[in-house]
Image: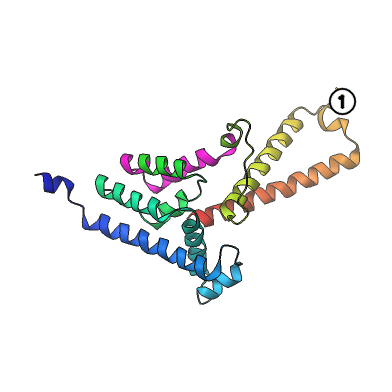
Amino acid sequence: MASSATAVSPEVKEANEKMKEAWELGRDLLDQLGMKANYGAMKSAASGEISTAEKYRKYRSMANRITEKELEAICKMCEKENKIWGPTFLVELSRLRTSKDRRQLAKNAIREGWGLIEFKRQIRLMIGPGSVSSRVGRKRKVDWTDEAEILDELAQMCHGWTRFAAEIQVNTSTENNSGLELLTKSLRERFEEASEQILDLQQKTKTRQKRTTD
């Protein structure tokens, strides 16, 4: 009875092997190209295949952050809980900066059997606009070699602008001379132009975030 309770399914073993292969590929790409290699170099490594180059980019970023020790711990948790993970979970998990956060989230996700959608949602909550301000006295440092972090920063700045723009529009009154009416005509026009451009930037950022996490 004890042996059957601890038996690991072939599916879990196969999934763990795929995670290890993805991590090893990411490490190989780091050794060959480094972390700062541009997209052209990645595309060349992928023999010109755009989808493969995108996958390589994700694996490289993932392997740059998740250690071999972390990967082994994740595989052991999957075997213990008999739950299937895969490279996409690792890519998502690598968006978290600290090993402590990654370890705790992986433990909860595997134990609770979260699907990819719920897993992504939990990560968004951890790295969303509210999470930065909650770290009192410490300013977030952006990893400028990590596209996902740069996109997160862009998304947060766009969110702050659009929220401010919405509030100032609501509080603009020609009768009480408030909000935008306090600004010169030239400034109002610039503000409206900037708002349109930032809305466009916000949409493009969201589209890119979706591509890098799918």
Q: Is residue 125 magenta?
A: yes
Q: Nearer the viewer, residue 178 or 174?
A: 178
| Residue at point 74%, 29% (across, down) | 170
Q: Residue furthest front?
A: 69
The residue where tag 1 is placed is 177
* Element on which disc 1 rests: loop
Relative to residue 200, is residue 212 drawn left or right?
A: left
Left or right, residue 20 beside residue 149: left
Q: Quadrant of the N terminus?
A: top left
Regarding residue 194, the answer to whether it shows in the image is: yes
* Local crowd size for mark 1, using a 10 Å CA cut-off: few (<14), some (14–19), many (≥20): few
How many numbered tags mark residues here? 1
Q: Is residue 169 left or right of residue 121?
A: right
Q: The magenta stretch spans which residues?
A: 109-130
Residue at the farthest bottom position: 47
Q: Is residue 35 above or below residue 90?
A: below
Residue farthest to the left, as pictured: 1
Q: Residue at x 51, y 39 (%)?
A: 126
Question: Does residue 51 appear anywhere in the picture?
Answer: no
Q: Quadrant of residue 128?
A: top right
The image shows residue 105, relative to residue 143, as above or below, that is above
Residue 194: x %, y % from top left: 78, 46
The image shows residue 31 at horizontal and vertical percentages of 50, 68
Q: Position of residue 92 (x, y in %)?
A: 46, 51
Q: Amino acid at mark 1?
A: Asn
* Applied colour scheme: rainbow
- Mostly what secondary structure, the magenta segment? helix
Q: Is residue 24 above or below residue 130?
A: below
Q: Look at the image and say whether residue 51 sits in the magenta stretch.
A: no
- Residue 113 at x, y = what percent? 32, 43
